[in-house]
Image (tube, rainbow, N blue to C red):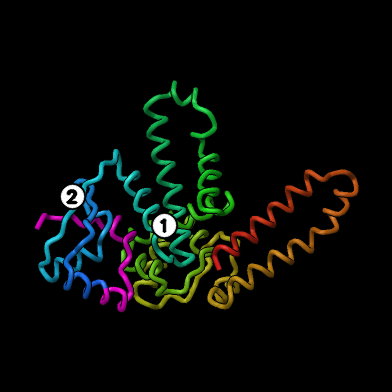
Amino acid sequence: MREVIIDEEFRVLLPSLDGETFRLLEESILQHGCRDPLVLWNDILIDGYNRYKICSHHNIPFNTVDMEFDSRDEVLIWIISNQVSRRNLTPIQLSHFRGLHYNAEKKIQGTYDRGSQEIKKSQNETFHFGSTANRLAEQYNVSRNTIIRNASLAEAISIIGEASPEAKRKILDGEVQISKKTLEALSGASEEEIEAVAAEIEAGIYKGRAPRGSELTQADIASDSILPEIRQLNAIISDFASNFNSMFRQLSNGGSVEVKAVLRSYIDRLEDLYKNM
């Protein structure tokens, strides 16, 4: 069989199947062989991790198909798009993928811009980071602000993964209760604090901590696992109610544009909540 390289950064994006689904796949491959080829980039596996695991264990031959990309970031985007289109992801997994996608595109744009300043000056808005967030927001059917927050979440998970790959796996597999809000806040925390959180998660003793300097309170952290969607909905409704009189006065004074902008922001927040429930 062809030698295949397992790259941990890519492998974590190819999640293992649950026990029953994996068993059914194994039975199918044992009976019919591996009918779908593994996808490789420079001999690195980028699709078909579960099939490869089964074939390697039982010494079953498999076919491969090679794809060409200019960089690891392009491979990352391809894997993300592939996984999002075929898997029923948890809210934190989906947020992680969206954030990784945004951060990868920023890297690609940064390389492009450094390579040609003249071209950079002549490009239209499509090549600006803000427009990247808008485009990905439309692609994933969320708000631009969600994409930006997801980028912070993905950055925090990556840093946690550098300190402890096991902690990163537990977060993405849902084995630890840690909210997206906490992860977003951790992206700006010190290296020592992130390492401490990673160690607690790996050891199975993580009880929740508000990053120093963040706006999160211990009450926020302690209630992470208690109907977070209801708490978010309550926060949106309360915020809307507190601003209602101000919006009414603006509307009475002809400020319909401003009111529409505010209403749009609330609609975006509600749509984000709906998508993540």
Amino acid under disc 1: Ser
Lateral position of residue 125 relative to residue 193, left or right: right
Instruction: From the top left corner, tell me how far across and down residue 271 is, in percent.
Output: 62, 59
Q: Examine the rendered structure and indicate whether residue 144 appears above or below residue 212.
A: above
Give me the residue at 38% from left, 70% from top.
Answer: 173
Q: Examine the rendered structure and indicate whether residue 209 appears above or below residue 123.
A: below
Amino acid under disc 2: Asp
Give me the residue at 32% from left, 47% from top.
Answer: 75
Magenta-highlighted residues = 1-24
Residue farthest to the top? 118
Instruction: From the top left corner, tell me how far across and down residue 240 is, in percent.
Output: 75, 61
| Mark 1 to mark 2 CA distance (whole Å) | 24 Å
Dividing the picture into quarters, in which one does residue 273 lie? bottom right
Instruction: From the top left corner, tell me how far across and down residue 20 is, in percent.
Output: 31, 78
Residue 21 located within the stretch drawn in magenta: yes
Lateral position of residue 20 relative to residue 218, left or right: left
Dividing the picture into quarters, in which one does residue 53 lie? bottom left
Give SS at disc 1.
helix
Residue bearing mark 1: 85
Looking at the image, which is closer to me, 226 or 51? Answer: 51
Residue 192 located within the stretch drawn in magenta: no
Residue bearing mark 2: 43
Query: Which quarter of the rendered picture does the N terminus lie within?
Result: bottom left
